[in-house]
Image (spheres, rainbow, N blue to C red):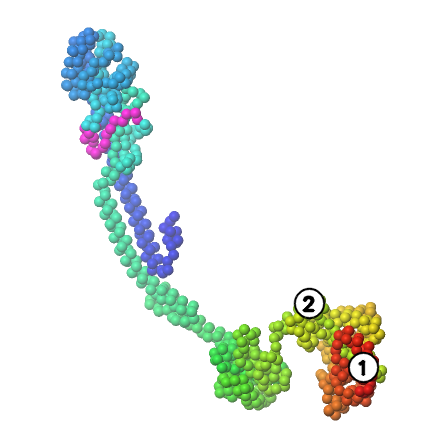
Amino acid sequence: MSATKILGLVRFRNLRTRLTVVYMGLFGLALLLAAIAVVTAVTNSAQRVVRDEMTAAGAVYSQLWTARSSQLQQGAGVLAQDYGFREAVATNDEATVRSALDNLRARQGVDGALILGVDGYATTTGLALDDAALDRLFTGLESGQIESGVLAIDGQAYQVVAAPVNAPVLIGWVVFAERLDAAQMRNLEQLSAIPLSAAVVLNRVSAPTGDGPITVRTPDGPSMRLDRPLPSFDKAAPADLVLTYPLKRAMRPYEALFWWLAAIGVAGLALLMGGTWALSRGLTRPISALDEAVHRLQQGDYVEAPVTSADEIGRLAASFNAMVGDLRDREARLTHMALHDQETGLPNRLSLERQAAAQADAWVVLFGVDRFEVVRNAIGYDSMARLLAALGGRLSALADGAPMARVGAGALGLVIVAADEAEAVGIATRLAEAAQAPLMINGAPVDIALTAGVAGRGAASSDLASPVDRAAIAVDQARAARRMVAAFDEAAYGDPGDNLSLISELMTALRDGDVTLAYQPKYDFRAERITGVEALMRWSHPRRGFVPPDLFIGMAEETGHIRPLTEWAIRRAIADQKTMAAAGHVLTVSVNISGRLLSDESFADFALAEVAASAADLCFEITETAVMDNPELALHIIARFAEAGIAVSLDDYGAGLSSLTYLKQIRADELKIDKSFILGLDQSSRDALLVKSTIDLAHSLGLKVTAEGVETPTALALLRGMGCDMAQGYLIGRPVALALLTEQLAAPVVELDLARQA
């Protein structure tokens, strides 16, 4: 693995340390490579010297061996050719033989001498041969292949030479033996220029080294070894002259050099570390300052890095400072955009919420511009933006300079400090009244009217914890109550989140039978009896209890679930009508149809098919305003109902913006006067006049009239006198379940009591 890869695996927290370590690592690597090269070169040189010396010593030893062998052979040959000695050998004159051998052994300086006869008998002097050695010697000489070599006697190596004794035939051999012991080896070692170790090895196990020395492992470490094979009288046990020299002895003269190299390397590393540290410190100080500035910038602190030089680092710091300035300006612009309305330049909702969150006793006052869309369409979008900006300035001035924020399309808000809700409402009322003066826009006065909502913080766990949301709802509540200022009424607002789950629960209730129909009777003045009933939905929730129809029917209309609800009501009403007929009560059943279904041809097909299949006597009650969304299609569907024999009743007449145009166009059979006129009939002459004129108008158009909300006998009598056709209300009967209605209709006293009251 390269140094670069090794350094890449190390993680540094600062550049200064990294530079120091990298440079030291590279320098150390260079020193290491140089040291390896020097040591390798020195070692190779020392080994080469030792190899040459050992090769030379081996050659010298070989020459000495040959010379000594020749010398001994000459001495033995002289003795073997002596006539008297040959005669003594031939006559077995052992004393003469032994005397001659001793004399010659002394002159030659050998350790032992002997005469070996061809019969294997030996006469020795100075040396005793064991039988094994004598057998090897005799075998070698008898073979005629060796006369000089190594012979092992009692485990000790001897240089042995022999000369034949002929008289005139071979009768034996004169043999000299010289011990190759440690003293002899030291004599050989002293002949070398280097302190070699010499030894004669018998029964060699390892392979010979050949012509040159080799490096081997020894207990003292690596050594050079040279093997010189010697002739041996035992072919099965070769003999070698082994020269060894420990390499550490050859390297000893260079140890001082190596120590000096190591000292120089350490000193160089230390100097490099100091120099690199100082250099890197100068280089990394501005970089560290730039890094610190970047971290502080990341935390939102716009600081500039010091520019300490004109080089690349200095230019980088200058560029960074320019970037910081641009970021500061850009963030200021983005912050302004995030907290201000782009059309008016006023603070926005987020700004208002921050102001409200910053004060514990803060109250949010929202001012809604009444008829905002009408005014905007009249003066244009740009002029409306200028109007809101001017209105915001006026309200801010009236509120002692409090910042005014634009919260919605036509809503402005500010934060006030008040001790309680009453004080906050009082401040809001004063501001709203004072601000409703005309504003000059494009040189023309524009009248404005304001509705204000006041709210404080809600519970943290509430969906409406934000005072801005609560104030916006308070504006709607004020408009619904037709008041200028209103505080947020949490009880009136209820729990819309919980109400949203009603729709899915309503569909389940339809399947489980928790939704039922209650029937309210309708009294016929001319027949003087109950001739019809209105089907009204009732839902008993297992957790909420009784759920008002206005709540779940209105939500069903908004969420698109009104059709399955109405289809169920039609089927249920048809089935209940058959039950009442079977009990002897033939009544017309009125079912309310949502205006959203009057633009649905497929619903009309369903309703007509159900009525046709059951021959039911139904009346569909619709509101007059139901035809406003799609008048052409709604009038077409109503006409289809009329042609199929289904009576159509205009419900809640007079409660909305009644139109004679629609009254003329709708093919209706009945007109139901809203209960708001009937409840005050016996107390208000204006209501009586309106009811009488409505009855006359309906009769003129061929419509029957039903009055809702009849609760007193006086109202019933007045309606009879005005020519009203039918009455419906608590006096006639409350909405009840089918079984109870059947029981009530079975009692004739009901008809008699109503007739008597009328």
Stretch in magenta:
185-204
Query: Which quadrant of the figure has residue 740?
Result: bottom right
Residue 22 lies left or right of residue 642; in this view the side is: left
Residue 258 lies left or right of residue 99; in this view the side is: right
**Residue 604 visible within the image:** no
Is residue 311 or residue 471 the one in the foreground? Answer: 471
Residue 31 lies left or right of residue 329; in this view the side is: left
Whether residue 48 is situated above or below residue 409 in the rendered picture: above
Residue located 28% across and 55% down the image? 272
According to the picture, the residue beneath numbered tag 2 turns out to be 508
According to the picture, the residue beneath numbered tag 1 turns out to be 750
Which quadrant does the C terminus fall into? bottom right
Residue contact between numbered discs 2 and 1, judged by CB atoms under 8 Å? no
Whether residue 140 is situated above or below residue 603 in the rendered picture: above
Assess disc 1: are there few (<14), some (14-19) or many (≥20) residues with their C-alpha within 10 Å of its C-alpha.
some
Q: Considering the numbered disc 2 on the image, is that residue within a helix, a strand or a loop?
A: helix
**Residue 103 visible within the image:** yes
| Amino acid type, label 1 | Val
In x, y percent, where is residue 727?
A: 79, 83
Is residue 66 or residue 185 the one in the foreground? Answer: 185
In x, y percent, where is residue 513?
A: 72, 68
Q: Is residue 422 magenta?
A: no
